[in-house]
Image (cartoon, helix red, strand yellow):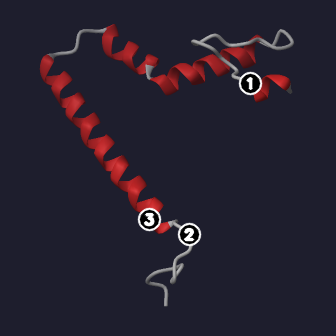
Amino acid sequence: MGMRRHAQFFARTVMVQDNNIEKASRLLNNILSKEGIFQQYRYTRYYEKPTQTRRRINYEKCKALYNEDMNRKIRFILRKNREDPFPGCS
């Protein structure tokens, strides 16, 4: 219980509680996947042609822009203290 209130990892170090290695392993894998370590490993495991690299980078940029725009729209729709809480549903 006390570990939840504190950082569960420090510099990718995971604390093992009650010899539960499976849980610590899942937590570490979750941390590494969120940081993109596995994805970077997959890209560098084999040679990637320069055209594929450019296409992938352009796709990632477009995806980031799209996600940012959608998050902004969702925040706009879900904001509080509006006169009409459900616009367009009159």
- Mark 3 = which residue? 76
* x, y percent for residue 85: 54, 79
- 61 in relation to 5, above or below: below
35 lies left or right of 56 = right
Please tell me which residue lies in front, 17 or 2: 2
30 lies left or right of 47 = right
Distance, label 1 to label 2, CA atoms, is 31 Å
**Callout 3: SS:** helix
- Mark 2 = which residue? 80
At x 82% / y 14%, what residue is drawn? 17
**Callout 2: SS:** loop
Give residue 70's quadrant in the image: bottom left
Distance, label 2 to label 3, CA atoms, is 9 Å
At x 24% / y 29%, what residue is drawn? 56
The amino acid beneath tag 1 is His
Please tell me which residue lies in front, 45 or 88: 88
* x, y percent for residue 19: 83, 9
**Which residue is the extreme one toward the bottom?**
90
**Callout 1: SS:** loop
**Which residue is the extreme one toward the left?**
51
- Mark 1 = which residue? 6
At x 31% / y 42%, what residue is drawn? 63
Tell which circle, 1 or 2, labels the residue nearer the N-terminal end: 1
* x, y percent for residue 78: 52, 65
Tell which circle, 3 or 1, labels the residue nearer the N-terminal end: 1
In the picture, the disc for residue 65 is none
